[in-house]
Amino acid sequence: MTERLSHVADLGRMPHAEAEALQERLVAQVRAGEAPDTLLLVEHEPVVTIGRAVEEPASEVCVTLLESAGAEVRQVSRGGRATFHGPGQIVGYPILDLRRHRTDLHWYLRALEQVIIEALGEFGYVAERVEGFTGVWVGGRKVASIGVAVRGWVTWHGFALNLDVAPAWWRMIDPCGLRPEQMASLSDFDGPAPPRGALEEALVRQFSRVFSLEMYHVSHTELFAEADF
């Protein structure tokens, strides 16, 4: 049974820095009780983000190689290590006030994994967790990475689900502490990856179910309009 209103906005293709600034603004509004829980869906230009678990970025990525290939390298405030974002991914940024759900980060990470597992199940994928890692795996390879941050129990950053990512990007980084060949896109398995729009709809549907939210689609410009929630 759904309980609360949540916004969901598809931002299309957007640079990472712009999406991060948008998250910062939403986090402040959600913390102040001025906005509902929100899920942002986006596809980024090529970028490698370095999480707080990495003290020396050079140990995880070759910045010069990445930049020469057209990727930006950014240090960010989420947990985790090096992650690639770019064309062929669905990136989701949930801005959730965990005080409205459960103030338990372990629960939150498992809930995000469950959203992705159930969404992939709608398309016949047998997706699962792997003990000792955060994320979602299919056929022994990682198809979704998760790295989050929390400010005053309001979440930001989120997940990246690989539809059809060029594998060369994985070979330029140490992806989440894994070997590049352990990473995969859905297109690496039998048949093409599901259509982006259909998979986004499945993610929104499962997000609504797992977090007991009534999802209401809004445009980018409507995100900061006053809402009764």
Image (spheres, rainbow, N blue to C red):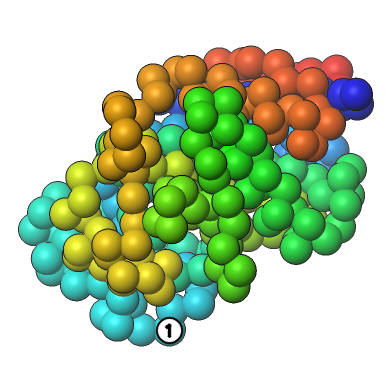
**Residue closer to the observer: 22 or 45:** 45
Quarter of the rendering containing residue 210: top right
Image quadrant where residue 204 sits? top right
Residue 192 is drawn in which quadrant? top left
Image position of 83 (left or right of 28) = left
**Percent position of residue 228, x then y:** 85, 18
Compared to residue 170, the image places residue 160 above or below, namely above
Residue at the image position 20 percent from the left and 69 percent from the top: 63
Residue 10 horizontal/vertical position (percent): 50, 23
Q: Quadrant of the C terminus?
A: top right
Camera-side residue: 181 or 196? 181
Residue sitting at x 68%, y 30%: 206
Which residue is labeled 1 in the image? 55
Q: Is residue 73 visible?
A: no
Relative placement, left or right, of 128 versus 64 is: right
Q: Residue at (57%, 33%) from the top-left corner?
A: 121
Residue at 8 percent across and 58 percent down: it is: 68
Q: Amino acid at mark 1?
A: Glu
Answer left or right for 127 relative to 32. left
Q: Is residue 68 above or below residue 5?
A: below
**Marker count (numbered):** 1
In this orientation, does residue 154 appear? yes
Where residue 7 appears, as percent x and y from the top left, is 69, 24
Q: Nearer the viewer, residue 221 or 103?
A: 103
Quadrant of the rendering where the N terminus is positioned = top right
**Secondary structure at numbered mark 1:** loop
Extreme left residue here? 68
**Vertical placement of residue 182 versus 54, above or below:** above
Residue 131, horizontal then vertical, whole percent: 61, 69
Q: Residues within 10 Å of mark 1 (few under 14, many from 20)?
A: few
Give 137 or 102, whichever is nearer the viewer: 137
